[in-house]
Image: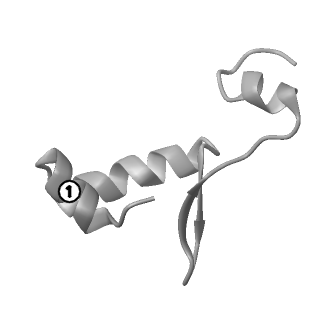
Amino acid sequence: MPSESELAERFGVSQGTVRKAIDELANENLLVRRQGKGTFVSTHDDPRSFFASFGWPQ
């Protein structure tokens, strides 16, 4: 995933706005942050985890 500064520049928003958006996506388990490595899109091997992200019963 691009860096926070690259995303901010690309979308014309502040880095703080990008950081908040990334934090929200990480809280929803859609992104994973790895210190020193970067931010990655989550993978979900269990199909039930897909529905859980929408708050649907499993």
Q: Quadrant of the N terminus?
A: bottom left
Q: Residue furthest top?
A: 56
As drawn, 58 above or below 30: above
- The amino acid on which the numbered mark 1 sits, given as a three-letter code, is Ala
- Residue identified by numbered label 1: 8
* The furthest residue to the left: 12
Name the foreground residue: 49 vs 38: 38
Coordinates of residue 45 in the picture (x, y in percent): 86, 40
Looking at the picture, tell me which residue is in the foreground, 15 or 43: 43
Q: Determine whether 17 is above or below 52 in the image.
A: below
Could you tell me how many numbered marks the image carries?
1
Q: Residue at x 27, y 56 (%)?
A: 7
Q: Badge 1, how many Cα within 10 Å: few under 14, some, many 20+?
A: some
Return the residue found at the far bottom: 36
The image position of residue 23, as x and y in percent, is 46, 54
Q: Where on the picture, by quarter, is residue 30? A: top right
Colour approach in the figure: one colour
At 37% across and 47% down in the image, what residue appears? 21
Query: Would you place residue 57 above or below residue 5 in this image?
Result: above
Question: Judging from the image, what secondary structure is the residue with disc 1 in?
Answer: helix
29 displayed left or right of 21: right
Q: Position of residue 29 (x, y in %)?
A: 64, 45
At x 34%, y 59%, the residue is 19
Q: Is residue 56 left or right of residue 16?
A: right
Q: Quadrant of residue 58?
A: top right
